[in-house]
Image: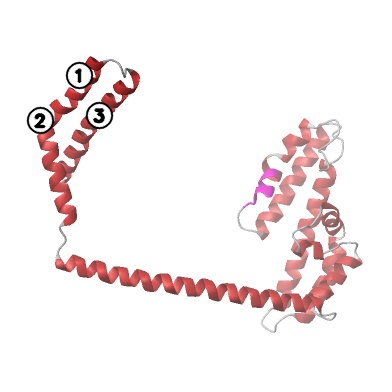
């Protein structure tokens, strides 16, 4: 079918569908009004025997025939595509199973490494515990605000120890300046975050405090954008909403929760 015939079919089918819908509505709205029901039914019949209705029937038949009629080449092509789809689905299922098995194996190895007293995770845990932070909660997705506050507050000391550990265990291909910059950047980011949130939870006394808050937000986001691509929802809230909320809760500062 040509594009013109397709458009004609859509237009004529809509006209008939509107008449059929009116008949349905009439039967529902006036079930005892035989005359109205007969008139709406006759309208559908009249359309079917009209020139437009006959053209629609002709186009419907032509459309159905064109969809049913497939050449031998098309049938062969369809068979090949179905076979390819089946192979791809099997490959996908195998890849999913392989990924699941590898994840289980990796999780088990990580679990065993964490139990090793001299392992990487245990050493990192001791660094955080040394500064009053229960780092293991982070891996359980239960990292509470208090340990996080401690990490921010003691970022300089924590990442001094972590830097020494990373230097000790780094691969030969990793340059020392990369680890040095990473730890220094984290100290700057966490320290600025600590100062910002410490101010947000205090009483806002005057405009100078608000200006200071705005400066801290800009300082924190500048370091954040230098280290990370994109902006997380939490970073967006800090950037675009923290100062407004700070002013709204001007008497007591933001809620600690």
Of residues 27 and 44, the one nearer the viewer is 27
Picture quarter containing residue 226? bottom right
Most common secondary structure along the magenta stretch: helix
Identify whether 56 is placed above or below 225: above
Of residue 150 and residue 190, the one placed in the foreground of this image is: 150
Q: Please, what secondary structure does the residue beneath circle 1 have? A: helix
Describe the element under mark 3 as helix, strand or loop: helix
Question: At which x and y percent is residue 97?
Answer: 54, 73
- As drawn, the label of residue 162 is none
From what the image shows, is residue 161 above or below residue 236?
below
Q: Is residue 99 above or below residue 200?
A: below
Marks 1 and 2 sit apart, C-alpha to C-alpha, by 15 Å
Give me the residue at 10% from left, 30% from top. Answer: 49
- Estimate the x, y position of residue 168 in percent, counting from the top left: 79, 81
Disc 3: CA contacts within 10 A as few (<14), some (14-19) or many (>=20): some
Q: With 153 as the anchor, is 221 left or right in this view?
A: left
What segment carries the magenta color? 231-237
Can you identify the residue that label 1 sits on? 39
Residue at mark 3: 20
Using residue 180 as the reference point, say whether residue 130 is left or right of it: right
Q: Which mark is residue 49?
A: 2
Residue 201: image quadrant is: top right
Residue 200 position, x and y percent, is 81, 41
Quarter of the image that includes the C terminus: top right
Q: Tag 2 or tag 1, which sits nearer the N-term?
A: 1
């Amino acid at each position: 079918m040509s594009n013109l015939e397709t458009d004609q079919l859509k237009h004529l089918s809509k006209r008939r569908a509107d008449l059929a819908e009116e008949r349905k509505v009439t039967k529902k709205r006036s079930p005892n009004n035989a005359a109205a029901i007969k008139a709406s039914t006759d309208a559908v019949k009249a359309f079917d025997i009209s020139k437009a209705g006959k053209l629609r029937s002709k186009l419907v038949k032509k459309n159905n025939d064109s969809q049913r009629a497939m050449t031998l080449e098309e049938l062969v092509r369809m068979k090949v595509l179905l076979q390819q789809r089946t192979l791809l689905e099997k490959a996908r299922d195998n890849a999913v199973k392989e990924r699941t098995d590898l994840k289980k194996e990796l999780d088990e190895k990580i679990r065993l490494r964490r139990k090793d007293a001299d392992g990487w995770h245990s050493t990192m845990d001791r660094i955080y515990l040394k500064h009053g932070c229960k780092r293991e909660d982070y891996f359980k997705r239960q990292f509470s605000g208090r340990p996080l506050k401690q990490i921010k507050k003691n970022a300089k000391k924590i990442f001094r120890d972590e830097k020494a550990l990373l230097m000790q265990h780094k691969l030969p291909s990793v340059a020392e300046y990369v680890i040095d910059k990473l730890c220094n950047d984290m100290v700057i980011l966490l320290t600025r975050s600590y100062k910002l949130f410490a101010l947000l939870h205090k009483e806002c006394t005057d405009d100078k405090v608000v200006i200071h808050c705005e400066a801290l937000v800009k300082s924190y986001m500048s370091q954040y954008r230098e280290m990370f691509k994109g902006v997380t929802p939490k970073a967006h809230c800090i950037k675009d909403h923290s100062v407004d909320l700070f002013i709204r809760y001007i008497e007591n500062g933001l809620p600690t929760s």
